[in-house]
Amino acid sequence: MKLFKKNQIIIYVIVLMLMTAGYLNYTTNSDQQKSVETAMQMEASDDMQLADIGDATLVNSNDVVPQNQTGATNTTNATDATNTANTANTSNTTMESTNTNAEVNGSNDSNTDSETTTDDTTVETSSRNNNDYFVKSKLERDTMYSQMIETYEKVLNSTNSLETQRQSATQEIQKINDTKNSIMICENLIKTKGFENSIIFVNGESISIIVGIEEIKPEEVAQIQNIIAREMKAKVENIHIATK
């Protein structure tokens, strides 16, 4: 009888242990399932938040612009480009026009300078030719007087010359020297009146004077005649004035 009770107690204990183990197993499974469901819900929530954040980031990073605004921007850029091109063309045209004007002006200035140089050269050449004429003519005139004086001196120095010949030669030499002095005085006085170049030729009572100008005024003619008449004791009607 005691053995039976002892076995029965063992069986009760085993049953109780099995029931406890079953209960504990059930409770553990239920908690694990709830934990899994909760974790799945949390993951789903996190995915949705990440999706929302990703969308927001995508919109901000692409900086989406409405279609109308994009068209307006393109139109503005095109207009600005056109205006810039027109401005560049206008600037190039202005520069080309300026360069052309500068070239034309430079050409005109060059032509003007060339004409001025040519005119100056012509005047200078003409003036030099006049100077050469007067210098050469005075040299020839003085040479003629020197030869005449030399001829009369030969008469004076010749032993075959008569006394009358010597007296005549002496008078001619004095006359030539007086003429040369009078000519020199007249030419210097005429120069003080503004006539840079002049030359006087004497042929007996006739006196010819050439002045280095193109035209001479009546009052200038009178001035020259008065000088020659006074210094050379000549008559006004015998004084002949020419220009060169």
Image (cartoon, rainbow, N blue to C red):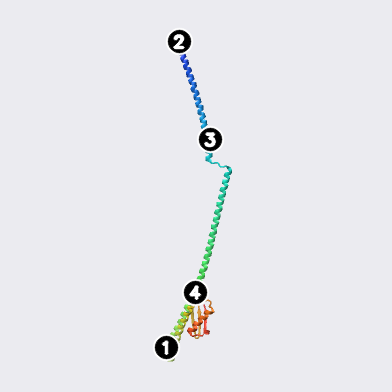
Which of the two discs, 2 and 3, labels the residue nearer the N terminus?
Answer: 2
Which of the two discs, 4 and 1, labels the residue nearer the N terminus?
Answer: 4
Circle 4/circle 2 CB separation < 8 Å: no
How far apart marks 4 and 1 lie (CA) works out to 44 Å
Circle 4/circle 1 CB separation < 8 Å: no
How far apart marks 4 and 2 lie (CA) works out to 172 Å
Neighbourhood count class around disc 4 (C-alpha, 10 Å): few under 14, some 14–19, many 20 upward: some
Residue 5's label in the rendered image is 2
Q: Nearer the viewer, mark 4 or mark 1?
A: 4
The number of discs equals 4
Residue 127's label in the rendered image is 4
How far apart marks 4 and 3 lie (CA) works out to 106 Å
How far apart marks 1 and 2 lie (CA) works out to 211 Å
In terms of secondary structure, where does tag 1 sit? helix
In depth, the one of 147 and 76 nearer the eye is: 76
In depth, the one of 153 and 54 nearer the eye is: 54
Q: Amino acid at mark 3?
A: Asp
Task: Indicate whether 110 appears above or below 79.
Answer: below
How far apart marks 2 and 3 lie (CA) works out to 70 Å
Q: Amino acid at mark 2?
A: Lys
How far apart marks 3 and 1 lie (CA) works out to 147 Å
Q: Amino acid at mark 1?
A: Leu
Residue carrying label 3:
52
Where in the figure is residue 137, as x and y percent of width and height? Answer: 48, 79
Residue carrying label 1:
156
Which of the two discs, 4 and 3, labels the residue nearer the N terminus?
Answer: 3
Circle 4/circle 3 CB separation < 8 Å: no
